[in-house]
Image: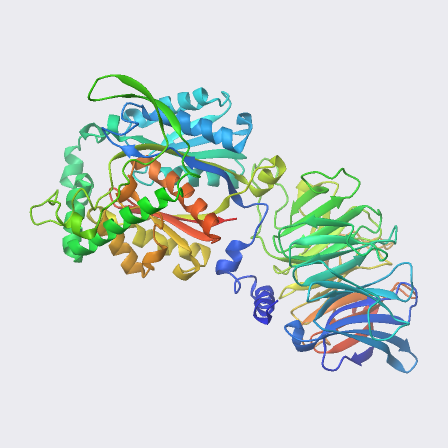
């Protein structure tokens, strides 16, 4: 019962609650809070060869939805809207995702939309649902993300640019491949290969340690799928419950031997960039008052999100632009945050953002990131919610931030509080 | 106007005895209630001014007090160390009962005015507890999950309890409902919510802000007034919990710390604020014959305190305007509200 806390409370009364803003205000619970009552993901498997290589994105989504209903015990008829972030499906995925929701057991009354904000689609889906609940449009919703990079990754995902777009210098930059522009950015910003490899190796090491300790077990929902054995051509039924990209024995030295992928004298290679993967994730959201009425377990709450634009060629700096923006909205700073989940699209951009924002390395991706277990584009933002909330809860910490850079030059960030 | 100095102790709450028109109790704390002892004063209003009859010292700050409605000598206090203590003022020094169940500062205590055999307490620990003076443990714990500055029994029903808290919500509990997941909660009213606008799906609302005080109207059993950090006093009709506030009274420049409806006039409300004033309000439903009614407004103001005013109470007896106020200026003022009212 400290005098400082009492003083903080009284000064909050006088200043209209602003002086005890920041972390204390974040931890306060209100019936209007948008809370997460269940969140999970499938395992992430390697594109083209992993356990989900023959499974369609929509089927992964069905698996994630079924597990979500199962775990939360939510009456599917109460879910009014489902937003699914996905980047690669032709036609945006709207048709097959609606079908997936029906196949998973949601009644026809549960609406579904597909959305695409590149690598932040999964987060955008959660934010859209949270905003819809906040505004009173719906009461219960699901934010999700899915990607089958095995089946849908390729040049077909981007429409040819018109002459008009090609003639505008900044628009033209939007189609520069991620690897190429990140290589250039690493060079311009002076991010050394050694720094990138060290960061990537630590991601692998953290992930294998977490996997061996079973720290992903809570967030991963095992999924049974058919899988064609490439050697025998035989189709088998397998249960996928582990990220297969995570592997032991990776060090900065072993990564140093890999040849650069995008330029002869470059620094980016397969070992310090995110893996191409398949996976799905889903997050069940509602108001705290609704959760209490329905007897749902509250895992954490969504606080706020930000989106920021940056130059297309510097898309990797997105988190650097988005994170301070969400701090401003919530009145907190980097010291108030216990864990940052910043997507590791490339080690180069993640290291640069972390250094530039002055974030303690120990707070970033404590269970590893996309370099170690993969980045199924549209899924990642929804995946981070599970990774973050379960880790915050396990370690008894509270405040987390999820963030990622976004292709064509954007960044998104969101603040979450575990309970 | 009568005055008494609570030397060394900053006032936090004042209550008139329900049995004697000449007796008031003051809960006070050293060092502005931030750290140090608390003191409960029992004061007598005499022909020679305010005389101390007795005081009781406590280890930690005192934030509120409530007289027993059945025993004229008994009184409970809300302590900073999480305890609720019952004193008998015919005895010296020590409480006759001390309950240590709350995990943080207790901010309010309120006696059940109908059954008179129970009282409630509310705390920073996010709970309300219901007690009987005769039982060693609390009877019931109601969660609010947020710092609950004020809880009160309805003066019209022995089983209806209300609270306001830092989460900007007014809660109504009905203890007759079966215990269930909802913990007797029957209404959860967002204080910051605006009134509905016909034809609009969403309604104008204010930023949520901490609610510090509330009181049940003594004549209209469904009307509650609330106020807090956003300085606006609001009244709600709990028969229509979704309708938003009935009246909104603007005027205080800083947070409102305490509200009390008049025991004599159904539209009259007294407030105490961090802006160092006490103000008298009508909520616009004047019951006085010949009065025009109309919009709620401020009708009088006491400017005599020189620090945050933390407590006010009306005298239940005699002519219709006597009240008392306490403040961080270490003074208890007993005054006639009619003297500051312009009507």
Q: Position of residue B143 (x, y in %)?
A: 67, 49
Q: Is residue B30 left or right of residue A355?
A: right
Q: Is residue B246 visible?
A: no
* Vertical side of A244 occupied by B85: above or below: below
Q: Position of residue B340 (x, y in %)?
A: 79, 70
Query: Image quadrant of residue B325?
Result: bottom right
* Vertical side of B139 occupied by A144: above or below: above
* Vertical side of A41 occupied by B207: above or below: below
The residue under the point 52% across, 65% down is A19
In the rendered image, the residue lying farthest to the top is A234
Q: Position of residue A214 (x, y in %)?
A: 40, 42
Query: In front here: B56 or A119?
Result: B56
Q: How many marks?
A: 0
Q: Position of residue A15 (x, y in %)?
A: 56, 65
Q: Is residue A400 visible?
A: yes
Q: Quadrant of the C terminus of chain B?
A: bottom right
Query: In front here: A347 or A159?
Result: A347
* Vertical side of B240 occupied by B334: above or below: below
Q: Quadrant of the N terminus of chain B?
A: bottom right
């Amino acid at each position: 019962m400290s005098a400082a806390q009492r003083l903080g409370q009284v000064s909050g009364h006088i200043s209209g609650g602003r002086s005890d803003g920041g972390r204390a205000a974040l931890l306060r619970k209100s019936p209007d809070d948008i809370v997460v009552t269940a969140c999970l993901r499938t395992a992430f498997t390697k594109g083209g060869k992993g356990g989900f290589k023959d499974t369609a994105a929509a089927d992964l989504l069905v698996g994630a939805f079924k597990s979500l209903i199962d775990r939360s015990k939510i009456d599917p008829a109460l879910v009014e809207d489902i937003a699914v972030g996905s980047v690669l499906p032709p036609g945006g995925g709207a048709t097959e995702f609606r079908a997936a929701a029906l196949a998973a057991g949601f009644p026809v009354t549960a609406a579904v939309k597909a959305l695409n904000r590149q690598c932040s689609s999964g987060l955008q889906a959660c934010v859209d649902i949270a905003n819809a609940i906040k505004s009173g449009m719906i009461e219960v919703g699901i934010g999700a993300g899915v990607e089958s990079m095995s089946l849908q990754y390729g040049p077909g995902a981007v429409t040819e640019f018109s002459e008009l777009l090609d003639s505008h210098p900044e628009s033209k930059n939007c189609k520069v491949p991620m690897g190429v522009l990140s290589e250039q950015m690493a060079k311009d910003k002076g991010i050394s290969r050694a720094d990138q490899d060290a960061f990537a190796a630590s991601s692998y090491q953290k992930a294998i340690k977490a996997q061996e300790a079973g720290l992903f077990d809570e967030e991963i929902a095992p999924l049974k799928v058919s899988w064609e054995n490439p050697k025998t051509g035989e189709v088998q039924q397998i249960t996928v419950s582990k990220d297969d990209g995570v592997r032991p024995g990776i060090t900065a030295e072993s990564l140093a031997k890999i040849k650069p992928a995008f330029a002869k004298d470059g620094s980016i290679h397969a070992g310090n960039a995110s893996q191409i993967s398949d996976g799905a994730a889903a997050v069940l959201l509602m108001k705290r008052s609704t959760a209490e009425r329905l007897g749902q377990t509250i895992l954490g709450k969504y606080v706020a999100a930000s989106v920021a634009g940056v130059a297309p060629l510097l898309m990797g700096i997105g988190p650097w632009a988005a994170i301070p923006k969400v701090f401003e909205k919530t009145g907190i700073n980097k010291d108030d945050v216990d864990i940052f989940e910043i997507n590791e699209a490339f080690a180069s951009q993640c290291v640069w953002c972390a250094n530039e924002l002055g974030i303690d390395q120990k707070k970033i991706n404590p269970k590893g990131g996309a370099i170690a277990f993969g980045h199924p584009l549209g899924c990642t933002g929804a995946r981070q919610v599970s990774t973050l909330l379960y880790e915050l809860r396990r370690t008894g910490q509270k405040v987390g931030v999820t963030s990622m850079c976004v292709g064509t030059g954007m960044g998104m960030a969101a603040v979450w509080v575990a309970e | 106007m009568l005055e008494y100095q609570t030397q060394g102790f900053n006032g936090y709450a004042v209550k008139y005895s329900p049995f004697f028109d000449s007796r008031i109790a003051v809960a006070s704390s050293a060092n502005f209630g931030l750290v140090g002892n608390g003191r409960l004063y029992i004061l007598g209003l005499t022909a020679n001014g305010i005389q101390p009859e007795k005081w009781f010292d406590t280890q930690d700050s005192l934030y509120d007090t409530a007289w027993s409605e059945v025993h004229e000598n008994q009184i409970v206090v809300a302590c900073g160390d999480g305890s609720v203590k019952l004193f008998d003022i015919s005895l010296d020094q020590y409480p006759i009962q001390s309950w240590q169940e709350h995990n943080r500062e207790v901010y309010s205590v309120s006696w059940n005015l109908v059954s008179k055999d129970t009282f409630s307490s509310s705390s920073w620990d996010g709970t309300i507890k219901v007690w009987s003076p005769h039982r060693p443990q609390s009877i019931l714990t109601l969660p609010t999950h947020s710092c609950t500055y004020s809880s009160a029994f309805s003066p019209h029903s022995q089983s209806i309890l209300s609270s306001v808290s830092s989460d900007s919500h007014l809660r109504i509990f009905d203890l007759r409902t079966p215990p269930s997941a909802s913990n007797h909660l029957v209404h959860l009213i967002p204080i910051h919510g605006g009134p509905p606008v016909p034809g609009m799906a969403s309604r104008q609302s204010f930023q949520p802000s901490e609610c510090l005080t509330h009181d049940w109207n003594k004549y209209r059993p469904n009307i509650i007034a609330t106020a807090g950090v956003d300085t606006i006093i609001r009244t709600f009709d709990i028969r229509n919990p979704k309708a938003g506030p009935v009246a909104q009274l603007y005027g205080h420049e800083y947070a409102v710390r305490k509200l009390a409806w008049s025991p004599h006039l159904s539209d009259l409300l007294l407030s105490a604020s961090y802006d160092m004033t006490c103000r008298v309000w009508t909520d616009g439903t004047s019951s006085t014959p010949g009065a025009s009614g109309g919009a709620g407004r401020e009708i009088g103001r006491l400017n005599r305190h020189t620090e945050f005013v933390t407590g006010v109470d009306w005298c239940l007896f005699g002519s219709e305007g006597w009240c008392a106020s306490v403040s961080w200026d270490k003074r208890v003022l007993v005054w006639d509200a009619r003297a500051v009212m312009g009507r």
